[in-house]
Image (tube, grey):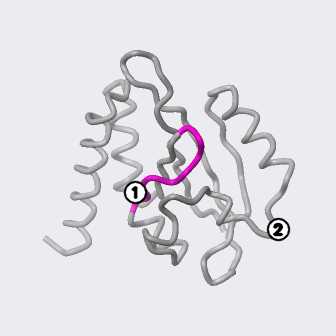
């Protein structure tokens, strides 16, 4: 097994553990979809309800050039720059304030300052008591 394959499997197992630790109420279908997206190289960003980054997938780190210590404790605003559309950001904020899932296309920025366009889907994550515990952003670079 190649190192990349081992790292991906380890990351999938970590996501499964996070789901269990935080008692997320995910259907088997949702669990499979998230796992498949990790396998397919989508980037994951997990935040607390205040939007502070708690964890990112390795593919996020590779895509953006950031290291874990650069992003953990920060908000996703670190990815925004002059080309990031404020109207789209407001639509995302409004949806998250209402604890609703949201999808958008955004211009984000790598640590190097280079812009990239990504499709992002953000889901509120709830525990078995129905409490919002996290937001999970799943991104894919589209150009």
The image shows a total of numbered marks equal to 2
Q: Is residue 55 magenta?
A: yes
92 over 44 or under it: above or below: above
5 over 92 or under it: above or below: below
Where residue 90 appears, x then y in whole percent? 81, 44
Looking at the image, the residue that sits furthest to the left is 1
Looking at the image, the residue that sits furthest to the top is 129
Quadrant where the C terminus sits is bottom right
Residue 9 or residue 113, whichever sits in front: 113
Where residue 127 appears, x then y in whole percent? 39, 24
> Residue at 56% across / 58% down in the picture?
140
Q: Which callout, 1 or 2, points at the residue further toward the start of the chain?
A: 1
Looking at the image, the residue that sits furthest to the bottom is 112
Q: What element carries label 2?
A: loop
Residue 98 or residue 137, whichever sits in front: 98
Q: Is residue 65 magenta?
A: no
Labelled disc at residue 83: 2
Location of residue 106 by image quarter = bottom right
Where residue 25 appears, x then y in whole percent? 37, 24
Question: Dot 2: few (<14), some (14–19), or many (≥20) neighbours within 10 Å?
Answer: few
Q: Name the residue under label 1.
A: 40
> Residue at 51% across / 75% down in the picture?
66
Q: What element carries label 1?
A: loop
Report the span colored magenta: 49-57
């Amino acid at each position: 097994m190649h190192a990349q394959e081992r790292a991906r499997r380890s990351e999938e197992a970590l996501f499964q553990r996070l789901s269990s630790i935080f008692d997320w109420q995910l259907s088997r279908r949702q669990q499979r979809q998230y796992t498949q997206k990790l396998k397919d190289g989508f980037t994951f960003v997990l935040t607390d309800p205040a939007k502070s980054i708690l964890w990112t997938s390795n593919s996020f780190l590779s895509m953006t050039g950031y290291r874990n210590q650069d992003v953990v404790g920060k908000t996703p605003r670190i990815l925004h720059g002059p080309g990031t559309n404020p109207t789209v950001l407001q639509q995302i904020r409004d949806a998250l304030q209402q604890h609703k899932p949201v999808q958008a296309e955004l211009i984000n920025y790598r640590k190097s300052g280079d812009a990239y366009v990504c499709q992002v889907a953000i889901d509120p994550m709830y525990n078995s008591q129905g409490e919002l515990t996290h937001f999970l952003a799943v991104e894919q670079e589209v150009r």
